[in-house]
Amino acid sequence: MNAVENVAGLVEEYDTLFQEVRGRSADSLERKLVRDAEWTPEAAEHLLRLARDYGSFMLRNALAISLALDIEDGELGF
């Protein structure tokens, strides 16, 4: 599976996961990521902060750059 297919699958996975969450508070979304997607609390908080702070336009470009440069795991170690 190539990187584009991986991203499409992840979007579907998170869409399904978050449909089960009542409300969209950071706390409820973080708990869902920790409980059902096996993220650590710190990583869940960071992921949601990135999404809210930068949005899909900036992150889509960051994803494309990371794929072009073959950066799988970043310097933060998540």
Image: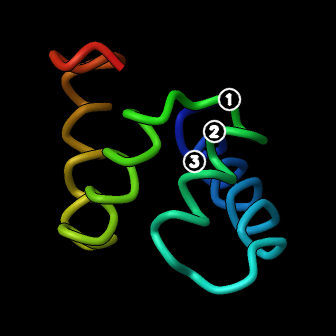
Q: Which residue is mark 3?
A: 7
Q: Where in the figure is residue 45, as x and y percent of width and height?
A: 38, 48
Label 1 secondary element: loop
Q: Is residue 58 left or right of residue 26?
A: left
The colour scheme applied to this rendered structure is rainbow
Number of marks drawn: 3
Q: Is residue 24 left or right of residue 51?
A: right
Mark 1 and mark 2 residues within 8 Å of each other at the beta carbon = yes
Residue sitting at x 78%, y 60%: 17
In the rendered view, tell whether residue 29 sits above or below residue 30: below
Select label 2 or label 3 by which is in front.
2
Q: Which residue is mark 2?
A: 34
Callout 1 crowding tier (Cα within 10 Å): few <14, some 14–19, many ≥20: few
- In which quadrant of the rendered view does residue 51 lie? bottom left
Q: Where in the figure is residue 78, as x and y percent of width and height?
A: 36, 20
Label 2 secondary element: helix
User: Residue 38 has which mark?
Assistant: 1
Q: Is residue 69 left or right of residue 32?
A: left
Amino acid type shown at disc 1: Glu
Callout 2 crowding tier (Cα within 10 Å): few <14, some 14–19, many ≥20: some
Label 3 secondary element: helix
Residue sitting at x 63%, y 46%: 33
Q: Nearer the viewer, residue 75 or 39?
A: 39
Residue sitting at x 19%, y 20%: 76
Select label 3 or label 1 by which is in front.
1
